[in-house]
């Protein structure tokens, strides 16, 4: 920046100019890119439209190649594993006969294929299966035989449910081919199971997602379909170059492809637009701050710029949901329609928070800088005006609290986040961002309310002191409390309780009292202590409000849940039955029924169920396919009891059209409503080939949704799944318990009398009641569909225990600590970036060392304890499995069923499982013979072969009980195995009990154990924090006091009291020595001062006498001369008189000036500190001399120079003095160069001349009073300058070279 | 069926046809059970439902929407029908189910399924 003086480039200005050029260039570049993106989008889409046919064929061919390549890569991966296994030492030794330990072989196979998601089998040279691990599949005896002839075999085997890719590798030993290794992997799943269970095994689905185009594989001998208008196909080859199938890729549809191209351009445009908006915003704010505007105008401009950018972001839809979809920008996590979308997601709310902070902090800084040295609260105006303001401020607190509570309520009610999940230790990103949003908001509200409270209370206290002041504060605090209670009474929905408001006001009053006592200046507010207090108050404000709303939402949720289940579901169930029937038609069930192989026909019912909403929602149901004569050919049933299916079958036997029927089955209390429908299945030519029938049981779904295992659901969601605590649903009829989802609830349990009394009121649809069942306290919502209904639904959740509440509080405190640490780290980073890094004190380091020493072993112990606790839960589960397998084994052995022949039907197994209350599987040899959960095996996701490890453990090693965890996709569960029959040849049958259906409960138990461990250790950590902080304070306090004392001594203050410092040992000795040293220094300084005063007075007297004497002599001579002329009557007397009088007057004026200078030096006025613009003062000072002949000025004033706290007149005097000295040092003319700049936390001013320079011997005496190299003046100028700068905590330095010039450097500290 | 219910169903049908949740979001209850294709579903607030639907329609342009079946069993009106969307160029068929709940004297959308 240049002004009226001729400018020359200075480096700080260059830096700013470069930054501006970069910013403008960046904005320009972004704007150009934006236009290019828009133009590019149009051109690209137009070009693609013009040559679409050719382009789509090329793309499809490229996709086809990519799909074939990926299939090849999958094969290679499996082949590498197969070869590794074939070459492993254990397999080689076993197959060559050197080691016949089968258990070791099982272990080796398990180890080598662990975590690969594959099935592995080892065959000997005769093709006999020796060991296995993981999933089984179809018998591949022909392919194994080929491998045993030395051929590497690769193929795919498909069933109606899955497709498996397998590679068989011959095992070659020195004696020749000794066996084969088969590795198989599922690459296709034809029904929509949750990815949690199948992982991402479907290759076609994965490729379709990655390529954005439909990819299908066909693994059969048929030739690849010929290309047509819609698709291209290619042949797939195995590793052995044999044909294994074909792949078909749909050509991209023009509209869809162009839409995706446009979407990609839109994403790029959105990203550029975002950058452009942000850059423009930063530039606009900088320009506004630099402009010559009033503070108010600047503040308004900044606010407009910030919110302009924010609103433009919302208008332009950036960050775009397609650019940053999901996560913190997902409205399903949090969204509110408030203010046109400024908080339509957690991420948007955070961005709005940043905009809000900027539009408060930047203008706030503009205004507050002026008042940094003033008391933070000052009351002006008339008493009446002040009274009104105080009243408004008092009312402002409850109003602000309500607005705040409304936001917190929205954060709870407009979100699906679980704020109080005791199982969660580290919050998710979404929860973390929302907590940060809420916490920052709480801190802002706390600060504003504290200022309001302080304003009100200091206003009430006025100028009183002592007891009167305390009393005024107490009365004022009570008045604030009364206003808040009154507000609660007057407002219909204050959103906070009286207790919450009163508690908060109490905290505010204490905080305001502290601020009033300690903060003398505004800058005193910006301290670490106040930061920590703000954090604490914000936490205290947020916790009860948040907890209150979470509890309210939980109860609300329960009411919705109850209403959902109580409302008639005819419409919904009719719809989903109809949809399932349509599914049969859409899947071309008729043609399959006519032409399909046996396996495909058998799977028809399951496939239709798997694709239906019924499976997603987990309804108990029956899917049935019959031939045209009504004979069942495919059946899938889930969740029904033995009686219901029989009744359902009776119902459906009469249906032969698409109409849905609603029928009551059973009678009295056991009545079950079922929804059934039938659709005819037709093949080509409209030939009737059979019927498909669907039956859904409504009552069963309502209470026992859990009967449909999560593993078989396409969706894991469900109303009950949304609850944090396990919900127990119970149904009462005529005042007695009819059914419950918990076995702990006794049958015929009566509805509590209070509930029945409450239900006498027809307007009361639901009642909350607390009760204790089996030693656990529950909160139960009793609800009924209509008044007078004999049917009552009870939804019970365990009441949170004290431990759970404590855990929640501790977890919350940990979040607060993490957020505070985050903010502190941010502040440290900002300081480091600004070149003023935070200097860690001795106390900080000591505290860090103590915490590290205490916490490190604690974390290790906590992790160990956590594992132990989880282990204990799992051990308990294993014990239970042990008992259950024993009970099943006993039941089978003592029963009359013929299980040894494998004739135990699914129905019998289900009956036994029902009696014993646990599911089980029965294996004969290593094959599944019976199961109480046939649907899991129908689905093909559970293996019909006994696990390899279980076979090795139970059959090979003869263990009486074996437990292991098994995995399906990402779902892990425990399975217990027990031998059932032991013949002379070994174990022939094994019974297993999986925890599949109750694994969620076990996982929950493990998580709760972890939460308890976390709670205990979090408490310990808090204790350590308090103890470590106390010790660090105590140990560091004497050192801190000593450091402060040293600083004061260095500044010349020797009156440092250290008598109250309590310290022992070396530190105590140091304190005492320091005290002695300062005493000695005081004595020495006093002697020096006395001597200096004496010398100064002598020198001053000498100087005064000398200066006064000088004019007196010419005055005396002139007067003597005039007297002689007068006596002589000389004619020239008159002329001489005039001349002499003028001379005398001049000398008297000189005497007067001398007196003034001494007076100025002796009586320097008290400085009046205020924010001063250094540039402005320097400009004014320099302009006084701009008419000096032969002198040219060269000025470079720093842009955006912050104001310094100084006495404006004093500073002007300093600058005038220095500039005048510079000019006087150049009698023959020259250049005075003036620069101002910001350097760290200071403003630096330099004044350089091209004069004669200052001799080296003179330099040390420059700032002494009465020293001067000039012929006139008292030599007090620089002494005065030094004194003014000392008062401002500033410095002055002089650098001079004889003959070259002098540079004076002045440093002024920033506030 | 009450005229008020019919009006709600009409608004829902129009809103889905135009891909504009604002056309029927005023009928949402405080909590809506919402299930959409590609969205796991569950209870969300009316504000969330609005933005979730807005995002849903950004990825799917409605081609044809019709509520064909209406019922009013036990005081719980519902409507169901079908819709066809253009999802990145691919045609997607979906079934629609809307049920209403009486809340504070007016009929509100309690459940909305599009999948």
Image (cartoon, coloured by chain):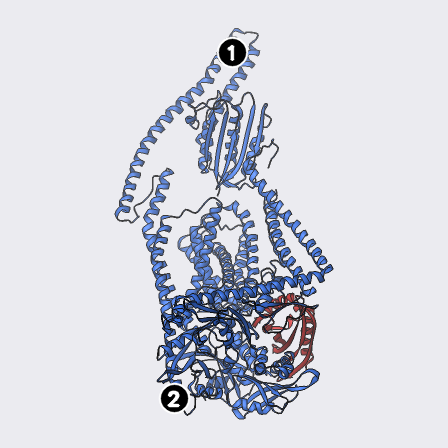
Q: Is residue A957 left or right of residue A362?
A: left
Determine which residue is flagged by label 2: A893
Which percent across, then down, holds residue A836? Answer: 46, 44
Residue A309, given in percent of the width and then of the height, sits at 62, 54
Q: Secondary structure under badge 2?
A: helix
Image quarter hosting the C terminus of chain B: bottom right
Q: Chain A is drawn in which colour?
A: blue
| Residue A668, image x, y percentages | 53, 93
Q: Which of A858 and A144 is in front in this view?
A: A144
Rendering colour (chain B): red
Residue lying at the far front of the rendered structure: A175
Give the camera-side residue of A947 and A815: A947
**Residue A132, relative to residue A1229: is it above or below?**
below
Residue plotted at (30% across, 48% down) = A1060
Tell me the residue that label 1 is attached to: A1122
The local crowd at label 2, few if under 14, some if 14 to 19, many if 20 or more residues have their Cα within 10 Å, is: some
Q: Which residue is drawn at 72% across and 58% down?
A: A46
């Amino acid at each position: 920046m240049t002004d009226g003086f001729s400018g020359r480039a200075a480096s700080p200005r260059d830096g700013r100019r470069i930054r501006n050029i970069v910013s403008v260039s960046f904005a320009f570049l972004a704007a150009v890119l934006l236009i290019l993106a828009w133009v590019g989008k149009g051109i690209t889409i137009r070009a693609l439209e013009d040559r679409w046919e050719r382009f789509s064929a090329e793309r499809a061919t490229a996709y086809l190649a990519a799909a074939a390549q990926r299939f090849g890569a999958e094969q290679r991966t499996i082949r590498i594993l197969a070869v590794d296994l074939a070459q492993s030492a254990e397999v080689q030794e076993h197959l060559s006969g050197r080691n016949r330990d089968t258990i070791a072989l099982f272990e080796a196979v398990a180890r080598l294929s662990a975590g690969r998601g594959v099935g592995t089998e080892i065959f000997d040279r005769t093709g006999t299966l020796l060991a296995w691990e993981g999933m089984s599949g179809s018998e591949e005896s022909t392919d194994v035989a080929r491998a045993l002839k030395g051929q590497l075999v690769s193929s795919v085997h498909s069933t109606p449910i899955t497709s498996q890719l397998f590679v068989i590798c011959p095992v070659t030993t020195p004696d020749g081919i000794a066996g084969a290794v088969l590795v198989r992997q599922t690459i296709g799943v034809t029904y929509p199971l949750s990815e949690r269970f199948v992982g991402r095994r479907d290759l076609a689905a994965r490729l379709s997602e990655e390529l954005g185009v439909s990819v299908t594989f066909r693994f059969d001998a048929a030739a690849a379909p010929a290309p047509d208008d819609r698709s291209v196909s290619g042949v797939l080859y195995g590793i052995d170059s044999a044909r294994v199938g074909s792949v078909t890729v749909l050509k991209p549809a023009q509209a869809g492809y162009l839409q995706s191209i446009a979407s990609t351009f839109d994403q790029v445009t959105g990203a550029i637009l975002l950058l452009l908006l942000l850059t423009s915003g930063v530039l606009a704010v900088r320009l506004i701050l630099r402009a010559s505007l009033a503070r108010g105008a600047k503040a308004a401009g900044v606010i407009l710029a910030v919110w302009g950018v924010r609103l433009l972001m919302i208008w332009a839809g950036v960050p775009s949901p397609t650019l940053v979809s999901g996560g913190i920008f997902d409205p399903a996590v949090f969204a509110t329609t408030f203010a046109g979308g400024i908080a339509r997601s957690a991420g948007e709310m955070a961005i709005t928070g940043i905009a809000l902070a900027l539009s408060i902090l930047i203008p706030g800084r503009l205004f507050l800088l002026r008042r940094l040295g003033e008391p933070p609260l000052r009351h002006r105006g008339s008493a009446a005006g002040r009274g009104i303001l105080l009243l408004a401020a008092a009312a402002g607190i409850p109003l602000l609290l309500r607005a705040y509570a409304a936001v917190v309520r929205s954060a709870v009610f407009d979100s699906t986040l679980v704020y109080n999940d005791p199982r969660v230790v580290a919050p998710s990103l979404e929860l973390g961002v929302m907590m940060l949003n809420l916490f920052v908001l709480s801190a802002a509200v706390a600060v504003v309310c504290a200022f309001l409270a302080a304003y009100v209370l200091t206003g009430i206290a006025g100028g009183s002191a002592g007891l009167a002041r305390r009393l005024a504060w107490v009365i004022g605090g009570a008045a604030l409390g009364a206003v808040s209670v009154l507000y609660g009474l007057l407002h219909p929905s204050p959103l906070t309780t009286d207790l919450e408001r009163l508690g908060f006001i109490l905290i505010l009053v204490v905080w305001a009292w502290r601020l009033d006592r300690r903060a003398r200046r505004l800058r005193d507010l910006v301290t670490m202590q106040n930061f920590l207090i703000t954090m604490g108050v914000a936490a205290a404000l947020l916790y009860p409000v948040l907890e209150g709303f979470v509890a309210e939402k939980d109860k609300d949720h329960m009411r919705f849940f109850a209403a959902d289940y109580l409302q008639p579901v005819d419409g919904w169930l009719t719809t989903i039955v109809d949809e399932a029937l349509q599914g049969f038609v859409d899947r071309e069930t008729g043609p399959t029924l006519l032409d399909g192989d046996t396996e495909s026909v058998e799977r028809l019912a399951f496939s239709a169920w798997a694709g239906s909403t019924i499976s997603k929602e987990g309804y108990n149901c029956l899917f049935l396919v019959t031939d045209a004569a009504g004979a069942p050919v495919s059946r899938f049933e889930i969740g029904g009891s033995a009686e219901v299916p029989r009744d359902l079958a009776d119902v459906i036997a009469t249906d032969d059209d698409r109409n849905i029927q609603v029928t009551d089955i059973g009678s009295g209390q056991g009545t079950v409503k079922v929804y059934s429908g039938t659709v005819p299945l037709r093949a080509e030519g409209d030939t009737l080939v059979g019927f498909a029938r669907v039956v859904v049981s409504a009552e069963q779904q309502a209470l026992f949704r859990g009967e449909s295992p999560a593993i078989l659901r396409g969706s894991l969601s469900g109303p009950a799944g949304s609850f944090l605590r396990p919900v127990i649903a119970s149904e009462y009829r005529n005042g007695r318990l009819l059914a419950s989802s918990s076995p702990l609830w006794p049958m015929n349990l009566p509805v509590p009398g209070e509930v029945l009394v409450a239900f006498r009121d027809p307007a009361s649809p639901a009642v909350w009641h607390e009760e204790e069942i089996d030693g656990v306290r529950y909160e139960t919502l009793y609800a009924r569909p209509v008044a007078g209904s004999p049917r009552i639904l009870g939804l019970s959740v365990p009441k949170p225990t004290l431990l759970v509440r404590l855990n929640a509080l501790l977890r919350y405190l940990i979040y607060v600590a993490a957020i505070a640490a985050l903010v502190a780290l941010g502040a440290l980073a900002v300081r480091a970036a600004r070149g003023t890094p935070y200097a860690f004190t001795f106390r900080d380091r000591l505290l860090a060392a103590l915490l590290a020493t205490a916490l490190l072993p604690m974390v290790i112990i906590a992790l160990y304890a956590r594992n132990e606790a989880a282990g204990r839960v799992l051990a308990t589960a294993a014990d239970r499995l042990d008992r259950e397998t024993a009970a099943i084994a006993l039941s089978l052995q003592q029963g009359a069923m013929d299980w040894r022949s494998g004739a135990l039907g699914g129905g019998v197994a289900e009956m036994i499982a029902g009696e014993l209350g646990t599911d089980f599987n029965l294996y004969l040899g290593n094959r599944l013979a019976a199961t109480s959960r046939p649907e899991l095996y129908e689905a093909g996701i559970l293996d019909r072969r006994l696990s390899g490890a279980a076979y090795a453990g139970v059959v090979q090693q003869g263990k009486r009980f074996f437990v292991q965890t098994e995995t399906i996709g990402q779902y892990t569960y425990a399975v217990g195995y027990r031998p059932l029959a032991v013949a002379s040849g070994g174990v022939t049958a094994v019974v297993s009990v999986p925890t599949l259906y109750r694994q969620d409960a076990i996982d929950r138990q493990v998580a709760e154990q972890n939460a308890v461990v976390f709670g205990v250790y979090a408490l310990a950590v808090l204790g350590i924090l308090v103890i470590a902080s106390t010790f660090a304070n105590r140990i560091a306090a004497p050192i801190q006091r000593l450091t402060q004392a040293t600083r004061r001594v260095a500044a010349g203050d020797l009156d440092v009291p250290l008598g109250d410092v309590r310290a022992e040992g070396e530190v105590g000795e140091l304190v005492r020595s320091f005290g002695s040293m300062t005493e000695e220094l005081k004595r020495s300084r006093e002697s020096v001062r006395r001597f200096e005063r004496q010398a100064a007075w002598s020198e001053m007297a000498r100087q005064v006498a000398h200066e006064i004497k000088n004019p007196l002599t010419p005055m005396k001579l002139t007067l003597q001369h005039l007297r002689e002329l007068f006596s002589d009557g000389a004619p020239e007397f008159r002329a001489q008189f005039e001349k002499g009088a003028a001379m005398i007057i001049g000398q008297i004026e000189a005497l007067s000036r001398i007196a003034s200078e001494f007076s100025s030096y002796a009586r320097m006025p008290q400085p009046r500190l205020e924010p001063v613009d250094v540039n402005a003062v320097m400009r004014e000072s320099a302009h006084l001399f701009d008419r000096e002949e032969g002198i040219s000025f060269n000025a470079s004033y720093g842009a955006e120079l912050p104001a310094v706290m100084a006495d404006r007149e004093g500073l002007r005097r300093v600058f005038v003095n220095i500039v005048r000295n510079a000019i006087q040092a150049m009698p023959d003319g020259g250049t005075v160069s003036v620069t101002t700049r910001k350097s760290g936390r200071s403003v630096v001013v330099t004044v350089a001349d091209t004069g004669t320079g200052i001799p080296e011997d003179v330099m040390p005496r420059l700032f002494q009073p009465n020293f001067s190299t000039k012929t006139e003046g008292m030599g007090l100028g620089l002494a005065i300058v030094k004194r003014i700068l000392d008062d401002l905590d500033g410095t002055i330095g002089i650098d001079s070279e004889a003959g070259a010039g002098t540079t004076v450097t002045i440093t002024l500290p920033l506030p | 069926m009450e005229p008020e219910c019919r009006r709600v169903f009409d608004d829902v049908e129009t809103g889905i046809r135009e891909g504009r949740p604002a056309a029927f979001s005023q009928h949402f209850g405080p909590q809506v059970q919402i299930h959409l294709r590609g969205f796991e579903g569950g209870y969300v607030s009316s504000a969330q439902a609005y933005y979730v639907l807005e995002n849903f329609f950004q990825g799917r342009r409605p081609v044809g929407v019709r509520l064909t079946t209406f019922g009013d069993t036990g005081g719980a009106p519902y409507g169901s029908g079908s819709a066809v969307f253009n999802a990145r160029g691919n045609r997607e068929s979906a079934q629609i189910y809307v049920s209403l709940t009486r809340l504070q004297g007016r009929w509100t959308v309690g459940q909305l399924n599009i999948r």
